[in-house]
Amino acid sequence: MFDPLLLKTFVAVVEEQGFGRAAEKLHLTQPAVSGHLRRLEEQVGKPLLKRTTRSQELTLEGDRLMRHARIILALNREAWAEMTRAPFQGRIRVGLAEDLVETRLLRELQNLALGYPGMEIEFQINIPGTLVGLMKQGELDLVVGSLCETDSSGILLWSEPLIWATAAQPLTPISEPLPLALFPEPCAYREAALLHLAHAGIAQRTSMLCTSTNALRSAVLSGIAIAPMPLSQLVAGISVLSAEYGLPPLPNAEFRLFSAPDADPEIVTALTKVFLEYCSMRRQ
């Protein structure tokens, strides 16, 4: 019989892509995580990971065990939920900003739902301003996204600089009026950029109206425009426009969690914990 603790550690190492991050997630020391993996490999009698100095990959046996491990742990969560808490029946409607749509977060939310057999999580991806409006209209129960220079309520998850993003190797000089790539209204990044440019007396034009982060990045990478963007969204080929160009500094992007007044308190608390843990790992 496999020890669920060892299986949980094994899954965490693979999903977090490292022993250190898995240790932080499980609140264990790194030697303890290594010990768990060693004991599990001894039980199997075969190596589960191909280790190098920088990464680790699943062996054939490791891949086979991973499939079983996830099922075993999911059944364990379901059994625990059924025996220890009153079943929650219903749909939770969650609004997510596109820059939060990451596999690791969605997996954690799915794991939470498995602990509530009667729960269905329905996601809607959009601009935070639009999502908050939908929540006020009663169409969403929870919204997570970023705002700038706001006194809105909600739990602050983390904040980071909003920067002017440009091609790392610009193909052409920046022209006037300033070419921008922006999301449509209501977008906090758009509002902050236009407001601070207006205060600085800098003329601008919208050269590309984007509906996705990929489109925004493509506009920047091609040299068509510069764009207001959270620092964490920079990818290879995009850099921060230096202060020598004279553009005004932008405020921080504040990622917050908002919940509707009539949302189930227990579920909101459980979802909030998932987001706080995810943001804690993301900041590192």
Image (cartoon, rainbow, N blue to C red):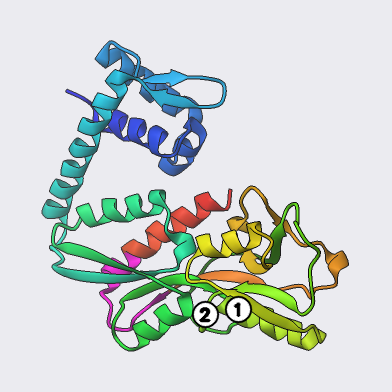
Compared with 69, 125 (above or below) is: below
Q: Which quadrant would residue 15 be assigned to in this image? A: top left
User: Would you name the residue on which mark 2 appears?
Assistant: 184
Q: Are marks 2 and 1 in contact (CB under 8 Å)?
A: yes
Name the residue: 71% across, 73% down.
Answer: 250
**Position of residue 44 in the picture relative to residue 86 (left or right):** right
Near-viewer residue (215 or 187): 215
Callout count: 2
Q: Which quadrant would residue 224 be assigned to in this image? A: bottom right
Point out the tag, 2 or 1, that comes first from the N-terminus.
2
Residue sticking out furthest to the top:
45
Near-viewer residue (89 or 143): 143
Residue 87: percent from the left, percent from the top?
A: 13, 63
Residue 76: percent from the left, percent from the top?
A: 18, 42
Nearer the observer: mark 2 or 1; the answer is 2
User: Would you name the residue on which mark 1 appears?
Assistant: 190
Q: Is residue 263 a member of the stretch shown in magenta? A: yes
**Position of residue 171 in the picture relative to residue 96 (left or right):** right
Q: Amino acid at mark 1?
A: Arg
Marks 2 and 1 sit apart, C-alpha to C-alpha, by 8 Å
Span shown in magenta: 258-269
Near-viewer residue (24 or 231): 231
Residue 257: percent from the left, percent from the top?
A: 44, 71
